[in-house]
Amino acid sequence: MKLRPIIKNKRGQSVGLIVFLIVGIISVFVLYLIAVPLAQVWDDISDKLHSPSAFGDNSTSGNRSLENVEKIDSLITPAFDGFVFIGLIAIILTLMVSAIFFNDHPVFIIFIFLGIMVAVIIVAQLANVADDIRTDPQINESTGIADKATEFKLSNLVIGKQLPIIVLLAGVVSILIMLSKTRGGGGA
């Protein structure tokens, strides 16, 4: 028995790239929104762990535990920051690599470009939310999260006013990758 594909004409599937881009960027943004409060919660827990009564007496095991807490203190914010940054880079690279495997007619490029514009508009709104989190004094007074968000150097570099530009460039490069392939199905 010979297996046959369900969809015989596979043209126009690159719209999935736009869906992937939007879902991926929203996922990275949600990761950012989770990582900043988690880092703030760790700071609150760490303050309690630094108290003299947290590990009992001042024995060697108590001192080692305190040293371990201090090591984690120095690693937790950069780890969350790097995780968000690497997640965004991974989404963009995956978008570009997957663009190689789509073989669309050039007519669909117009619809893909419109989809990228929609993605840029959505991402611009998310970037405004991230900027509000970092700069809003009301958020900082009630939770202190704005101060913690400023410690996320790499994430703030890409998740901010530059994010729509990054998404637009990644989308345009993906379109160029799709157009650069030969019609015979081979690579560039």
Image (tube, helix red, strand yellow):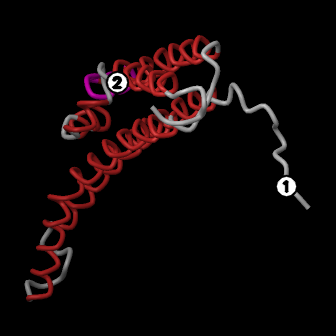
As helix, strand or loop, the secondary structure at mark 1 comes to loop
Quadrant, the C terminus? top left
Q: Is residue 84 above or below residue 66?
A: above
Query: Which SS class for mark 2?
Result: helix
Q: Quadrant of residue 135?
A: top left
At x 35% / y 50%, what residue is drawn? 38
Query: Nearer the N terminus, badge 1 or badge 2?
Result: 1
Q: Is residue 171 magenta?
A: no
| Residue 114, image x, y percentages | 57, 12
Residues packed near mark 2 inside 10 Å, few (<14), some (14 to 19) or many (20 plus) = some
Report x, y in % for residue 181: 51, 28
Which residue is more in the foreground, 174 or 116?
174
Report whether 62 appears left or right of 21. Answer: left
Q: Quadrant of the N terminus?
A: bottom right
Q: Splitting the image into 4 quarters, where does residue 11 fall?
A: top right
Give, as a three-letter code, the residue at label 1: Leu
Figure check: 53 above or below 84: below
Horizontal side, residue 118 vs residue 49: left or right: right
Query: Quadrant location of residue 88?
Result: top left
* Stretch in magenta: 128-137
**Would you name the residue on which mark 1 appears?**
3
Q: Is residue 136 magenta?
A: yes
Predominant secondary structure, magenta span: helix
Q: Position of residue 151 (x, y in %)?
A: 19, 40
Q: Is residue 58 left or right of residue 158?
A: left
Q: Against 43, is 142 above or below?
A: above
Tell me the kind of residue under disc 2: Ile
Label 1: how many Cα within 10 Å (few below 14, some 14–19, many 20+): few
The location of residue 136, given as percent across then percent down, is: 29, 22
Q: Do callouts 1 and 2 mark residues in contact (Cβ within 8 Å)?
A: no
Residue 166 has which mark?
Answer: 2
